[in-house]
Amino acid sequence: MASLPALRAVLLVALSVFLTVVLGFGLPALLNAFMRMLGLPETSVTECIVALYAVFVLYVATPRIPRGLVEVKGKAVLITGCDTGFGYALAKHLHKLGFTVFAGCLLKDKGGDGAKELEELHSDRMKVVQLDVCNEEQVNKAVDHIKEILGESEAVLWAVVNNAGVSTFGEVEFTSMDTYKHVSEVNLWGTIRVTKAVLPLIRRAKGRVVNVASMYGRMGNIMRSPYCISKYGVEAFSDCLRYEMKAWGVKVSIIEPGNFIVATGILTRDIVATTANKLWSEAPSEVKEDYGKTHFEQNMALMRSYCSSGQKDTVSVLDDITDAIMSKRPHTRYNPMEPHWWIRMQVMTHLPGAISDLLYF
């Protein structure tokens, strides 16, 4: 199977050819008519086409232009959600690059495997801390611990990566309010809670805030409303924070991963079965009667099919987070996802809703 960069390159070339045809044949006629309406010479059309195409080429090429790297020495990073998945892999990756890593683990005090494996590195630059992002006391205790460690060295807290999160599914009428609250408490309020706690340290270092959202922070989907709401919130919070922190030299970036279900194990057939039983058993009788068991089972079969889908390698996510932390001019948003999801996100965020609804729903 072709690699993600290769597929993305093919898609970009195809899009470039398509735009060349459109710009070469359709746009001149429209611009000529517009110029005649304004009483301007039609010779300006060529310059307009060249300028538009140059902007497109620059947009495509910008991510590939070297933007310089900050020095790693003397810099520490706090990462939440390091028990498994992206957080665990990122903690090891940044440690290997030379950062001092504060790896926040939900299950450290309970002997979680991820926390144990990170501690077994026996490195002065790997600090595993107990951290439940929903627990204000634990967050404050973790920040006090970070301050104490940094106070004994010349290192600064350069970045925080808000990675901790949970996922769930279910149609709106089958999903309880408690589920909506829990998902937002972890994904959104946890991000805000941790960010506010460490922001003075990050601000003094003129460092980075990196928030892991999702492609579902930019577009909705059926059966994903609790998750989408929480990730849309992360996107809005990150944008507002970026505007506010610009004056302080702090860069705020958003990571929008696509489908990494297989790579992270965030959704398994057992989880689908357990969640499905809970959704059906707790649904109001009126909802069960109106929707019907057949409809419900079809949607659960769709969720089971997702369990074996998505990218198997997290390298693209780790590379984007690393760039957001180390680049002198990090991007506002990163989109580590498969090409078809990237295209879908562009369609759903840039075209009228009537068109995207027709294409995908």
Image (cartoon, helix red, strand yellow):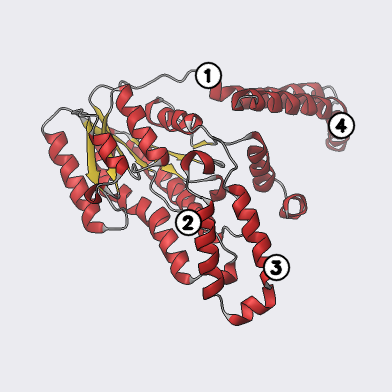
Which numbered dot is residue 65? Answer: 1
Q: Nearer the viewer, mark 4 or mark 1?
A: 1
Q: Residue at x 67, y 48 (%)?
A: 348
Residue 20 horizontal/vertical position (percent): 79, 24
Which numbered dot is residue 230? Answer: 2
Query: Which three-letter amino acid code belongs to the residue tagged 1?
Result: Ile
Residue 349 horizontal/vertical position (percent): 64, 47
- In screen coordinates, is 38 left or right of 341? right
Sequence-wise, the earlier of marks 4 and 1 is 4
Circle 4 crowding by C-alpha within 10 Å: few under 14, some 14–19, many from 20 = few
Q: Nearer the viewer, mark 1 or mark 2?
A: 2
Q: Residue at x 43, y 33 (%)?
A: 321
* Structural distance between the alpha carbons of marks 3 and 1: 52 Å
Query: Which three-letter amino acid code belongs to the residue tagged 4?
Result: Gly
Sequence-wise, the earlier of marks 1 and 2 is 1
Asked whether the residues under the numbered discs 3 and 1 touch, taking CB atoms below 8 Å apart as contact, a structural biologist would say: no
* Structural distance between the alpha carbons of marks 4 and 1: 31 Å
Asked whether the residues under the numbered discs 4 and 2 touch, taking CB atoms below 8 Å apart as contact, a structural biologist would say: no
